[in-house]
Amino acid sequence: MTVFMDYLQKIADNNIIYAGIGSLFSPGRIRPAETPIEYTSTLLYYFCADAMSRMAKVTGKENDSQRYSDITQNIKSSFNRRFYDESEKTYGGQEKNTLALAFGLVPANDEASVARNLVNDIVNKQHYHVSSGVFGTRYLYEILGKYGYGETVREIFNQTGYPGYAYLFSRGATTFWEHWGELKFEDNVKPGEDRSKNHPFQGGFDAWLYNVLAGMMPDPENPGFKHIILKPHIINTLDFAKAQYNSIYGMIRSEWQNAGNELRWLISVPANTTATAYIPALNKDLISESGVPAIESEGLTFLRMENGSAVFDIGSGKYEFVIKRNKYRY
């Protein structure tokens, strides 16, 4: 990996890399007009440098860790000078805003503004349709959920016109295609029918279902789901959401339901693991677990309030939380 990083440093021009493949298959095109190759290549250069810094630190190579950390910061500075419009708080489009947010390249304190610009593009310019290439759609739904725009994700899924999943299915798709079902492309003479019909390029929403809506995520500091992050993003207009994942320690479950005047959240934490649960409530005293106040329930330790959630440390087992309606954060 150090050889590869040396190569990337060699081909970078003021920390910007112009070589690469880039994103693919935005609606109507094979190569997205919005996102140049140097945008995605430099973003991945940043990702690699950051990963090298973190890996070196874990393995006790402090000097290497600091060296790659410095490279990471230099790339970030050059990237934002090259691509970020600080006055407008945007990188210039749906895919570019999504990727900058997903990979941590947005300047401090500007994340919420960039997220608002992303939503403005989706709602007002694209009328709840995706205009991103496949690189951006992998992260688009997660980013919208993370910044509180779950309803926007729901509206994207509900669209029946092109481009959209319903349109793709109307073309007879029983798998996810390489593209959005186009018969022809703006930038290629070959017809769309010649493209792959079994290609999970557009399946980025899967990660949103598990990681955001159900809120099941691994803890980077304790890999392999030895410690689990449980942080569901509730959408008020959905009746329920449920997901499960069979980890190496056993089944992880998260299921929430908008039931009458209350929110119910059922979770399962496998044996020999622990979890941090972010319960969407305005006050820890508004939460019950299996019929008793959560702060008194066995296996739970209250840690703090954070951004409209009560955060608990949880041991292995099954839990049923109840939060009264209008007392939890959507």
Image (tube, rainbow, N blue to C red):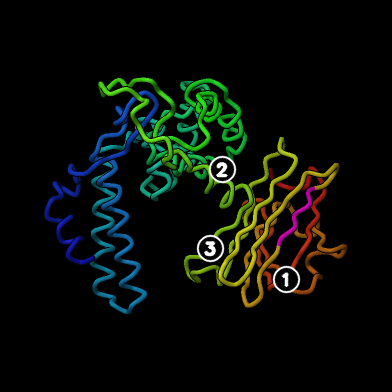
Q: Residue furthest right?
A: 291
Indicate which disc, 3 or 2, sits on the residue closer to the N terminus.
2
Local packing at callout 1 (Cα closer than 10 Å; few below 14, some 14-19, many 20+) is: some
Q: Which comes before the other along the chain, label 1 or label 3?
A: 3
**Mark nearer the N terminus (1 vs 2):** 2
Amino acid type, residue under disc 1 in the picture = Gly
Report the number of discs. 3
Proximity of marks 1 and 2: CB atoms separated by less than 8 Å? no
Q: Secondary structure at mark 2?
A: helix
Which residue sits at x=56%, y=43%?
145
Counting from the top left corner in percent of width and height, residue 212 is at 58, 49
Mark 3 neighbour class, 10 Å CA radius: few under 14, some 14 to 19, many 20 or more: some
Q: Does 114 appear above or below 67?
A: above
The residue tagged 1 is: 317
Question: Is label 3 in a helix, a strand or a loop?
Answer: strand
Q: Residue at x 50, y 24 (%)?
A: 171
Q: Which residue is mark 3?
A: 218
Mark 1 or 2: the one toward you: 1
Q: How far across and down, in percent of the image, does residue 31 sit?
A: 29, 31
Q: Are marks 3 and 2 in contact (CB under 8 Å)?
A: no
Q: Which residues are magenta?
A: 263-267
Give residue 48's position: percent from left, percent from top. Answer: 29, 58
SS category of the residue bearing label 1: strand
Residue at the spot of label 2: 145
Q: Nearer the viewer, residue 126 or 177?
A: 177
